[in-house]
Amino acid sequence: KAGVTQTPRYLIKTRGQQVTLSCSPISGHRSVSWYQQTPGQGLQFLFEYFSETQRNKGNFPGRFSGRQFSNSRSEMNVSTLELGDSALYLCASSSGTVTYEQYFGPGTRLTVT
Amino acid sequence: AQSVTQLGSHVSVSEGALVLLRCNYSSSVPPYLFWYVQYPNQGLQLLLKYTSAATLVKGINGFEAEFKKSETSFHLTKPSAHMSDAAEYFCAVSDQANTDKLIFGTGTRLQVFP
């Protein structure tokens, strides 16, 4: 099976802009979770989508949003970018049921200047 | 709330030596615990998981971890380090109600010297 894919891999944006990141889960997986990884804050959970519905949400401002499509692909959007949003954004997919195993993509490295 | 503490942000060992990476958790319910590894410029790869079955869990690449409830620990070990083990290792916990929400530790960078 193909793994989790994320596009783009690298992105440079300017403060105030918005950005959309994409994640394609492993075939058959219905759950997609997003994490932010920074040197200062480490790995932090953003949100999880299961069957097109947000099932869990972390403690991030409303500028961070996401959605999931009927084919389980997911996007996350960050509006009004701030310098502190520079991070590696990781997507993980799972079956969303009882296996408790998440498979991570390679991440999107976002740099805000 | 669930939390994870990884003792030691950096660990250095010689090739062939024992690897021991420490993880302590805090959980109000029986936890599900995980170890992930991250190589430079890559995502996270699941090494092993504990989900209330056997307390000694064997994972990939020769790693294993033992769940000790009395010590609230889930330390990762490997009998003999290999150069290719050099990476960052993360311990994570999730609770049974939110199994796809992982709380990660701050990570331990493992260096392996020849």
Image (cartoon, helix red, strand yellow):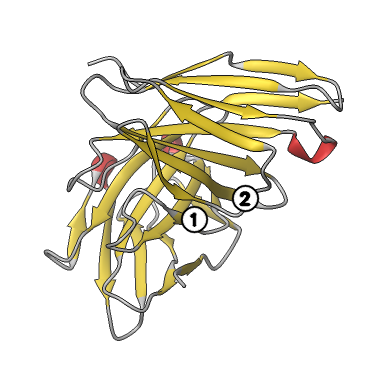
Residue B32: numbered disc: none
Q: Do circles 2 and 1 both sit on a common chain?
A: no
Can you give x and y, in whole percent of width and height, for residue B38 in the image?
A: 48, 38
Q: Residue furthest left?
A: B53
Can you give x and y, in whole percent of width and height, for residue B88 in the image?
A: 52, 44
Q: CA distance from mark 2 to mark 1?
A: 8 Å
Residue B110 in sight? no
Query: Which one is nearer the viewer's eye here, A29 or B62?
Result: A29
Can you give x and y, in whole percent of width and height, for residue B35 in the image?
A: 37, 52
Against B48, is A94 above or below? above
Residue at 49 percent across and 40 percent down: it is B86
Kindly indicate the quadrant of the structure image that contains residue A27.
Answer: top left
Against A48, is A1 above or below? above
Can you give x and y, in whole percent of width and height, for residue A71 in the image?
A: 31, 17
Where is mark 2, residue-wise? Answer: A42
Element at label 2:
strand
Give the residue type at disc 2.
Gly
Residue A105 in sight? yes
Query: Which one is nearer the viewer's eye here, B30 or B68?
Result: B30
Circle count: 2
Q: Residues within 10 Å of mark 1 (few under 14, many from 20)?
A: many
Query: Which one is nearer the viewer's eye here, B33 or A69?
Result: A69
Q: Residues within 10 Å of mark 2 (few under 14, many from 20)?
A: some
C-beta proximity under 8 Å, tags 2 and 1:
yes
Residue at 52 percent across and 59 percent down: it is B105
Residue at 36 percent across and 74 percent down: it is B73
Where is mark 1, residue-wise? Answer: B104
Give the residue type at disc 1.
Phe
Against B15, is A21 above or below? above
Q: Is residue B39 left or right of residue A93?
A: right
Residue at 67 percent across and 52 percent down: it is A41
Against B98, is A3 above or below? above
